[in-house]
Amino acid sequence: MSLAAALRATLPAGLALAEADPAAPATGLWPEETGATARMAPARLREFAAGRRAARAAMAALGLPPAALPMGADRAPLWPDALVGAISHDATTCLAFVGRRRDWAGIGLDIEPAAPLPADLIPVICTARESRDARLARALFCAKEAAFKAISGQIGAIPDFHDMRVTLLEEDRFCARLGPPFAPFPAGTRIPGHLVREPDQIAAVVLLPRP
């Protein structure tokens, strides 16, 4: 099963997932999106364009009209007011989740290769406690990336990886917990998510429904 198919099997109603090839030519960009691309290397430009194509395909899957996704100052996509979403890619896959903002407070997605995290990155990503088993570092990194993406539109800040601790649970679930507060989230806020694993890839998903 492909990673996209495995992720679709976990999707609740009201969310759409679409896929694009990050190695395909960089087509389909809207004028509002091209301002961020002037200095991109060719490979990065292809990934950027694939993410926008995937996002618009996900919008269409929800029955919504396509929209531009400019890049914000933090390099994250600027979603239309009525939508919330997440884009992630690795060397072979680019995926986008899209939902309606009335239903979802945040969506986080990260895709990583199913390979050990480089040793020099482990102390950057993992707290001392998380570093006890280096075999888990890639999954922890993936979970933190997805959790950060899910809350980034609300906090207006870029947390450090050590500002969040992740506990891996049974059945590939996880719980990310904020250390310091990031308004509107108080210290200790728990952010649940789940992992999806394929032989060569791992993905983390965080879905935050509206109260």
Image (cartoon, rainbow, N blue to C red):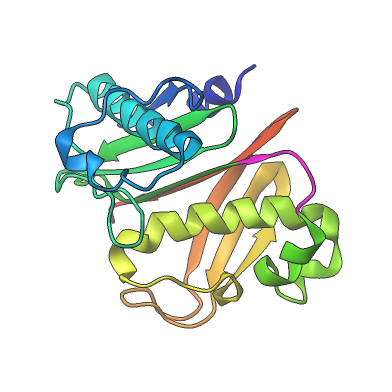
What residue span does the magenta drawing correspond to? 112-117
Going by the image, does 197 lie left or right of 15?
right
Q: Is residue 88 magenta?
A: no
Q: In the rendering, at what x and y percent does residue 194 appear?
A: 58, 45
Q: Could you tell me which residue is drawn at 37 percent across and 74 percent down?
A: 185
Look at the picture and state if 187 lies above or below 191. Answer: below
Compared to residue 74, the image places residue 161 above or below, namely below
Name the quarter where the C terminus is drawn: bottom left
Q: Nearer the viewer, residue 117 or 137?
A: 117
Residue 31 in the image, given as x and y percentages of width and height: 16, 36
Relative height, residue 210 to residue 112 (above, below): below
Q: Is residue 11 visible?
A: no
Question: Residue at the location (63% across, 48% down)?
Answer: 173
Q: Residue furthest top?
A: 1
> Residue shown at 67%/62% (left/top)?
167
* Residue 116 among magenta residues: yes
Q: Measured along the vertical axis of the image, is residue 72 above or below residue 66?
A: below
| Left or right of residue 127, residue 182 in this image | left
Residue 28: image location, x then y, percent? 27, 24
Residue 121 place in picture, x, y as percent = 72, 63
Q: In the rendered image, which quarter contains the N terminus? A: top right
- For this view, does 127 lie left or right of residue 69? right
The chief SS type of the magenta part is loop
Side of 171 relative to 155 (left or right): right
Compare residues 179 and 67 and report the one nearer the observer.
Answer: 67
Camera-side residue of 137 and 193:
137
Q: Is residue 183 visible?
A: yes
Q: Residue at x 51, y 66 (%)?
A: 190
How many numbered discs sit on the rendered protein?
A: 0
